Amino acid sequence: MIDEDLRQRRLKIIEEHFETEVAHRFDDTLTTFNGHPRYEIMPTGEVFDGDEEVMGYYTSTRRAFPDQRHDNVRLHVADETIIAEFDLLGTNLGELYGMPPTGRAFRVPVIAVFFFEGDRITNERIYFDTASLVNQTGHAELLAKAFGIK
């Protein structure tokens, strides 16, 4: 079981992580990791490993959704992880997987599991309903393409 001091330091890192992502201060977001950032996007199977790939993930997702943000954040602390439940919101104002922007907004529930070493994040594993995201943003054809539907 982790002690209260480590618990509070980890919670502060999660708060900083969310705040710097929303503010597009991605160099600061990278400092919330242990020196080697990693994201696993579970519904798409994408993995972004290391500074360059993670920075690419940040810039491409914020190009598509420049106002991306979190709402209704609930945190659950375990010994090796913090599980964050939240609503992810944004508006499709830029290209998404090669598709033009629709100007449509989305709100999808997300679970992000943050793995820790000491008080720094080693990995963020993200779970969300991709179908809801692409339908709400007006990109249902991405779903059809993924399932081979014409």
Image (cartoon, rainbow, N blue to C red):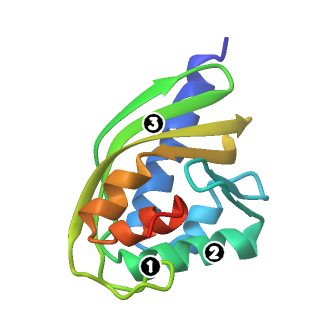
C-alpha separation, residue under disc 2 versus residue under disc 1? 17 Å
Q: Position of residue 93 (x, y in %)?
A: 30, 83
Residue found at x 26% / y 71%:
138
Type of amino acid at the residue the image marks with label 3: Ala
> Looking at the picture, does residue 7 appear above or below residue 118?
above
- Position of residue 119 measured from the top left corner of the image (x, y, whole percent): 67, 38
Q: Give the CA distance from mark 3 to mark 1.
A: 25 Å
Q: Which numbered disc flags the more N-terminal residue, 2 or 1? A: 2
Front residue of 86 and 141: 141
Say which mark, if any, is on residue 6. Answer: none
Task: Give the secondary structure at mark 2.
Answer: helix
Question: How far across and down, in percent of the image, does residue 75 sit?
Answer: 42, 30
Quarter that holds the N terminus: top right
Q: Amino acid at mark 1?
A: Leu
Q: Is residue 56 left or right of residue 67?
A: right
**Callout 2 amino acid:** Met
Q: Which residue is mark 2?
A: 55
Q: Name the residue at 36% across, 88% down.
A: 100
Mark nearer the N terminus (3 vs 2): 2
Q: Is residue 52 left or right of residue 17?
A: right
